[in-house]
Image (cartoon, rainbow, N blue to C red):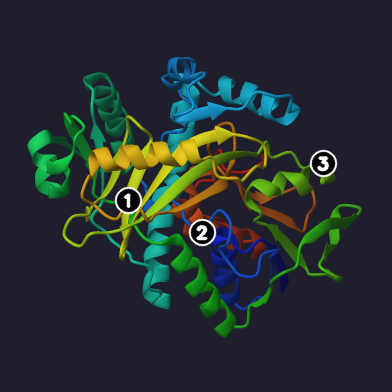
Amino acid sequence: MKIVILGSGVIGVTSAYILAERGHEVTVIERQSGSGMETSFANGGQLSYCHAEPWANPEVLPKIVKWLGRKDAPLVLHPGFDLAMWLWGLRFLRNCTKARARYHTINTLRLALYSREIMKYLRGKTGVDFAFRDAGILHIFKDDKNFESALLQAKMQQEFGASYKSMTYQECMELEPMLLSANDRIIGGIHFPLDESGDIFAFTRHLAKKCQTIGVVFKYDHAILGIDTVGDEVSGVLAGDGVFTADKYIVALGSYSSVFLNKLGVKTHIYPMKGYSVSIPVNVGKAPQVSITDQSQKLVYSRLGNILRVAGTAEFAKYDTSIDEFRTTSILRHAKNLFPEAGDFANVTKWACLRPSTPGGTPVLGRTKFKNLFLNTGHGTLGWTLAAGSARILADFIDDKPAEIDLTGLTLS
């Protein structure tokens, strides 16, 4: 079967590999000069299978009020009239209930743990090198209230397969000795042993090369101009200077998915959530080995070879990808407080991206009202985590096979 995939980030490339492995003729269309050049370029590096709690939850509401007006807040809203943003925000607020947060957590966790198994398969099958680490992720806490709340969340998730260990301050220091030099007060932590970390960009680029060896064609420097339809089918994709036709089409365009899908009357409610990262050259022996999540600042830390990647924050600024120096300076300040000797803080690389976010936090997979158009998008901050499982699910949709997990809450329906 001939398949066209729109988008060559980690979602599109992983989908291409699994489909080509099944014998399909796959073409990937990408506006950049290579794979993984946008949201998959420099994220936090965490494969956080057990971090399934959505942004939309009851506890975030008072925090949003507290963060209003603070430029260094974990979440920043740029005021202005954007109807799509305000509608997204209203849907987000609707999902900030205990029942809805639990519902989205369970659905995301089911997909995440499945994705962990498919990622294990891909690592073994392809041998792709991407600074992979399987030491789990340690969430650290600086106040009792947040620690207690997170323990309740972890206990709930354990019912559905996400193991954890509550850790004292001393146990956190034993697991990651570099925390001993922290200037911040740490009261304890939660270690999720099933979690992993790795370089998303290295994975995406190397997997794209593996794709080419099994016949996948990549059309780089091809900006997508439109998706044409006839009746209830897509008839072709206008990109670059040509029209690409196929039996089936997959939209994996991240935050830009809704730009094209809205024109087709396919409503995914995806909106871009801007995030930042800094890459710090490490001081050998001084940088952490275990991936860390600082819950108080909503920042994550991952050792990726000779760099320490620090990423996080959320900002609503439409499709603006420019770097706000105040935001990245704030990230660096927190990184210095936690790991003051970790690396060369004077020579860092800064980056910003747009995360394709749905109000409830779950991705949108599978069929649309057009019988040959499929979705693999809306993964928010968990695109790296959910990529492998989502790709396998999409391949099953393409092949008209039943999915291997329950897809409740993960499709348009």
Camera-side mark, 1 or 3: 1
Q: Horizontal placement of 251 versus 71: left or right?
A: right
Q: Which residue is mark 1?
A: 345
Counting residues from the start of the chain, the first of labels 1 and 3 encountered is: 3
- Percent from the top left, x then y, of residue 177? 12, 48
* Displayed quadrant of residue 223: bottom right
Query: Residue 41 bears which disc, if any?
Result: 2
- Percent from the top left, x then y, of residue 7? 66, 61
Identify the residue shown where x is 67% and y is 37%. 318
Q: Which residue is mark 3?
A: 265
Q: Secondary structure at mark 3?
A: loop
* Residue 276 seen: yes
Q: Quadrant of the N terminus?
A: bottom right
Q: Secondary structure at mark 2?
A: loop
Q: Nearer the viewer, residue 45 or 195?
A: 45
* Residue 404 seen: no
Q: Nearer the viewer, residue 299 or 48?
A: 299
Amino acid at the residue labelled 1: Phe
Identify the residue shown where x is 77% and y is 59%. 372
